[in-house]
Image (tube, grey):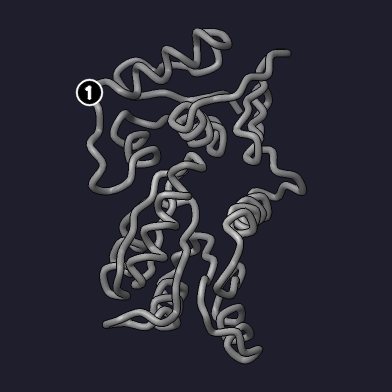
Amino acid sequence: MRVLLIEDDPMIGRNLAIGLKEAGMAVDWFQDGIEGLSAAETGHHAVILLDLGLPRKSGIDVLKTLRSRGKDTPLLIITAKDAIDDRVEGLDLGADDYLVKPFSFKELIARIHAILRRQAGHATSTFCNSEITLDLSSRQAAYRGKTLALSAKEFALLYTLVSHPGTIFSRSQIEEHIYGWGEEVESNVVDVIIHYLRRKFDNEIIRNVRGVGWMVVK
């Protein structure tokens, strides 16, 4: 799962990026509104974490621009502004949630999971197709009677496919979802992760479309 973090405070941003990566997410971190907006418009992110007090372009202006241009990526505002009017404005402009600093990291993760559940129409922290069930909170996968905990990259790859069942993803598209910008992409990492997932479960858990990419069934 790939997260876009737009936060100008170096200490907060660094700690959030570390925590999100430890939670199994790829993180793209930008420290001003213009660069953050560009990343939000061009990247493939599961969720955006947006501070309001940004240099060059405020968080509110970033939010307004994204929604006016039809970008509907789930977005969680993280800010020290705790006035009711600020919360109402942010939510009315299209934010999916609003979290006031300082906050518990556990609460942030729970709210990210809640946003993703709502987007997918789920009442629980699970995502599934006809064969695979993924639990966001425990990072476990269930397939044909077997349930196992997965590594961060294994879960991220399987989540990418299960959240879009029937869609074929190329190697580069999968890499975009499981790596953040600036991270070095290891050679043949997609093949290796798929090999491990198939060895843990079954060869049919991920289908190969020769010359095109990989998919899971609907």
Q: Nearer the viewer, residue 39 or 31?
A: 31
- Furthest residue to the front? 11
Tell me, yes or no, if residue 130 can be seen here.
Answer: yes
At label 1, counting other C-alpha atoms closer than 10 Å, the crowd grade (few under 14, some 14-19, many 20 or more) is: few
Horizontal side, residue 162 vs residue 26: left or right: right
> Residue visible at 61% across and 69% down?
97
Q: In the figure, residue 96 lies in which quadrant?
A: bottom right
Mark 1 — residue?
Answer: 187
Q: Is residue 47 above or below residue 7?
A: above
Q: Is residue 120 above or below residue 140?
A: below
Horizontal side, residue 98 vs residue 212: left or right: right
> Residue visible at 44% across and 73% down?
51
What is the x, y in percent for residue 101?
Answer: 55, 73
Horizontal side, residue 37 vs residue 218: left or right: left
Q: In the figure, residue 192 lies in which quadrant?
A: top left
> Residue visible at 22% across and 37% down?
184
Tell me, yes or no, if residue 119 can be seen here.
Answer: no
Q: Secondary structure at mark 1?
A: loop
What is the x, y in percent for residue 61?
Answer: 40, 83
Horizontal side, residue 31 vs residue 137: left or right: left
Dot 1 amino acid type: Ser
Q: Nearer the viewer, residue 145 or 100?
A: 100
What is the x, y in percent for residue 161?
Answer: 50, 32
Split into 4 quadrants, where in the image is the C terminus? Answer: top right
What is the x, y in percent for residue 153?
Answer: 43, 30
